């Protein structure tokens, strides 16, 4: 990964010369975000670190690595993202999602960096039944949601110059995700059961990366909800995946969340209202179905 070795401390560098650091750069979102930032912030070094370069669970090394690099902005997209795994491994999830954020905040404070944090719709309980605003009260139902909310709180308390981007239902060209899983299972089993009582907005990591870049270009601060337009259930999403990928002869059966019996409780409705982001940047992410068609036409799935 470009620039992973870091550079020597140079406190005299002007802000515009300082690098942008992405932590969690080898994950699903990171692998789309990094090249886009590099293409958008020409002349500025964009550095991607993942667990091999920085383990955010470790306070001392996280602080010193960030302070030594002396970035202008730290974008934290590293997380313990296995939502069901978090229920069994509470401490491990807390260490990464909450404590990890704290360690990054300490490092960023040490060098005056802005911090960007990717958060989730799972901080809401889903009872609202209409799109969630940035000002709506969080009430997470799962360990994952609680640890991510803690990460938000740590950042809000620690650094004034922060940006929290809440998003949802990510899929992309890299890593494990729902779209890849539907296509794999369709090939293996020809028969799938999919939950039909959770509603959200599937969001393409390529589009989200553009949105993050847009918010950075506007030097935005505070909380923003970002997702592709429209909404659906996982069942209707899986129907679209098979249709757009032109996979035939697969039986899809809708089931309830209760019948699926996953360990983590998810909100039944977690659509995010994205108007604040649209007003701020003048951008509007396309409808999820258009993004999905585009994704499936790239041949990278
Ligand atoms: N996926 C979604 O649907 C979704 C929805 C809403 C919000 N988000 C948020 O969006 C962000 C990106 O999600 P994603 O799906 O791209 O996640 P991801 O694919 O799981 O990537 C996260 C990356 O962080 C790394 N990491 C884990 N623990 C670390 C540690 N202690 N120190 C440093 N790096 C560590 C992971 O490495 P390993 O793979 O080796 O563990 C992985 O490369 C996360 O903050 C997530 O909470 C995701």
Image: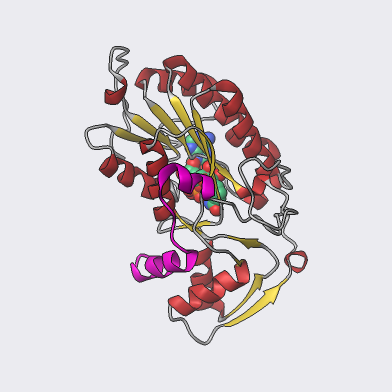
- Between residue 170 and residue 272, name the one nearer to us: 272
Residue lying at the far top in this picture: please name it: 12
Q: Residue 192's x, y, as percent?
A: 61, 76
Q: Which residues are magenta?
A: 275-301
What residue is at 49 percent from the left and 58 percent from the top? 228
Residue positioned 49% across, 85% down in the render:
248
In the displayed structure, 104 sits above or below 262; it is: above
Asked where in the image residue 67 lies, by quadrant, the reply is: top left
Q: Position of residue 62 (x, y in %)?
A: 48, 24
- In percent of width and height, residue 38 lies at 28, 41
Drawn side of residue 29 relative to residue 198, left or right = left
Is residue 212 visible to us here? no
Tally of numbered discs: 0
Specify the quadrant that holds the N terminus. Answer: top left
Image x and y of residue 142, in percent: 72, 47
Relative to 158, say whether 255 is above or below.
below
Check residue 279 for magenta coloring.
yes
Q: Is residue 20 left or right of residue 276?
A: left
Asked if residue 174 is positioned above or below residue 75 in the image, the reply reads below
> Secondary structure of the magenta portion, mostly?
helix
269 magenta-colored: no
């Amino acid at each position: 990964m470009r620039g992973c070795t870091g550079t020597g401390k140079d406190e005299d560098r002007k802000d515009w010369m300082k690098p942008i650091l992405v932590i969690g750069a080898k994950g699903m979102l990171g692998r789309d975000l990094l090249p886009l930032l590099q293409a958008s912030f020409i002349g500025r070094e964009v550095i991607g670190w993942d667990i091999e370069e920085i383990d955010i669970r470790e306070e001392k090394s996280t602080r010193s690595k960030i302070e030594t690099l002396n970035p202008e902005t730290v974008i934290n997209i590293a997380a313990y993202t296995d939502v069901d795994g978090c229920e069994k491994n509470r401490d491990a999830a807390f260490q990464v999602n909450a404590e990890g954020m704290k360690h990054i905040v300490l490092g960023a404070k040490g060098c005056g960096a802005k911090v960007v944090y990717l958060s989730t719709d799972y901080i809401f309980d889903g009872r609202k039944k209409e799109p969630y605003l940035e000002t709506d009260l969080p009430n997470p139902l799962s360990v994952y949601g609680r640890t991510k909310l803690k990460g938000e709180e740590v950042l809000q308390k620690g650094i004034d110059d922060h940006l929290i981007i809440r998003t949802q239902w990510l899929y992309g060209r890299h890593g494990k995700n729902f779209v890849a899983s539907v296509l794999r299972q369709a090939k293996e089993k020809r028969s799938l059961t999919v939950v039909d009582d959770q509603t959200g907005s599937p969001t393409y990591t390529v589009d989200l990366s553009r949105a993050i870049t847009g918010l950075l270009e506007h030097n935005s601060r505070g909380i923003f909800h970002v997702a592709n337009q429209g909404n659906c259930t996982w069942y209707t999403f899986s129907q679209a995946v098979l249709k757009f990928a032109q996979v035939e002869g697969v039986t899809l059966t809708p089931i309830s969340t209760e019948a699926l019996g996953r360990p983590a409780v998810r909100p039944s409705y977690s659509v995010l209202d994205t108007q604040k982001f649209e007003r701020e940047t003048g951008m509007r992410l396309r409808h999820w179905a258009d993004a999905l068609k585009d994704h499936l036409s790239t041949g990278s799935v």
